[in-house]
């Protein structure tokens, strides 16, 4: 019987299932003491919303909205790679109060292939990310989702995450933005950042970053998108 299997064997079997199927089979929030529920904790504390089938997506939404034991992951990955505009679809299909509660509980947030519009929407909830320690943003590499070419700038969105004192708990920031961001001396330093991995536009922006914007950083990975403009 399945209940007789050791946790190691159970988790080995789970690797061959889609994460949503693992939740279907073993997630029992009404009985958290059950061994199988506890054994799959990584599957409900770390949620990735990507190209799941529509039925699986609706199941996750039901778990987020469940009034008795709502699903509140510690880690959330949202991506547009498998399904266009999935991030906006997710944010628009969950009521504001529940999104606030989800972000309030997050320690880690990863946004993949996101647009500036996605970040503008998420900005609404900045003040609710009181426990967020890890943020990874990979911006949209191409304009394949759009009907006409548009050059997007992500500088302002990154400023709001890092240099406005809205997210003091943040310790790690990774921004994959190949065009690089422009920094200014008037930005507010982030004293709690310990790790930063970003691309800035020129070496002048690097000088600004090193001039007190991240005074307590322990590790930095900085790339320049273009040589210094004379």
Image (spheres, rainbow, N blue to C red):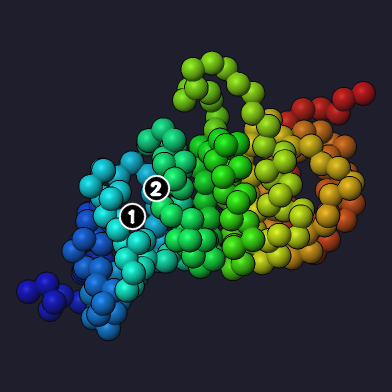
Task: Indicate the quadrant containing the C terminus: top left, top right, bottom left or bottom right.
Answer: top right
Give how far across and how far down residue 101 sits, in percent.
49, 65
176 vs 127, nearest the viewer: 127
Q: Is 103 placed left or right of 47 in the picture?
A: right
Q: Are marks 2 and 1 in contact (CB under 8 Å)?
A: yes
Q: Is 175 placed left or right of 209 in the picture?
A: left
Identify the disc placed on residue 61: 1
Answer with mark 2 or mark 1, whichever residue precedes in sequence: 1
218 vs 92, nearest the viewer: 92
- Residue at horizontal 68%, vertical 43%? 157
183 vs 202, nearest the viewer: 183
Name the residue furthest left: 1
Q: Residue tagged by mark 2?
A: 93
Q: Is 19 placed left or right of 228 in the picture?
A: left
- Marks 2/1: CA distance? 8 Å
Name the residue furthest bottom: 33
Mark 2: few/some/many CA within 10 Å (<14, 14-19, 20+): few
Total labels drawn? 2
- Residue at horizontal 68%, vertical 52%? 161
Give how far across and how far down residue 203 sits, in percent.
84, 36
Residue 44 makes an appearance in the image: no
Q: From what the image shows, is residue 217 above or below residue 112?
A: below
Secondary structure of the residue carrying numbered label 1: helix
Secondary structure of the residue carrying numbered label 2: helix
């Amino acid at each position: 019987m399945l209940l007789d299997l050791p946790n190691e064997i159970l988790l080995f079997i789970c690797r061959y299932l889609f994460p949503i199927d693992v939740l279907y089979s073993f997630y029992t929030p009404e009985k958290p003491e059950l061994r199988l529920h506890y054994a799959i904790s990584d599957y409900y504390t770390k949620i990735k919303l990507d190209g799941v089938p529509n039925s699986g997506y609706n199941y996750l939404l039901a778990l987020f909205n469940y009034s008795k034991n709502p699903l509140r992951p510690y880690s959330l990955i949202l991506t547009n790679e498998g399904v266009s505009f999935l991030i906006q679809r997710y944010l628009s299909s969950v009521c504001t109060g529940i999104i606030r509660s989800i972000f309030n509980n997050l320690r880690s947030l990863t946004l993949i292939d996101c647009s500036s519009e996605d970040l503008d929407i998420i900005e609404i909830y900045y003040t609710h990310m009181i426990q967020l320690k890890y943020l990874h943003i990979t911006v949209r590499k191409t304009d394949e989702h759009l009907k006409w070419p548009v050059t997007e700038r992500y500088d302002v969105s990154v400023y709001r995450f890092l240099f406005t004192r809205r997210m003091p708990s943040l310790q790690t920031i990774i921004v994959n933005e190949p065009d690089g961001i422009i920094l200014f001396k008037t930005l507010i330093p982030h004293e709690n950042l310990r790790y930063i991995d970003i691309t800035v536009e020129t070496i002048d922006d690097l000088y600004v970053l090193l001039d007190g914007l991240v005074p307590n950083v322990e590790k930095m990975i900085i790339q320049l998108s273009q040589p210094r403009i004379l």
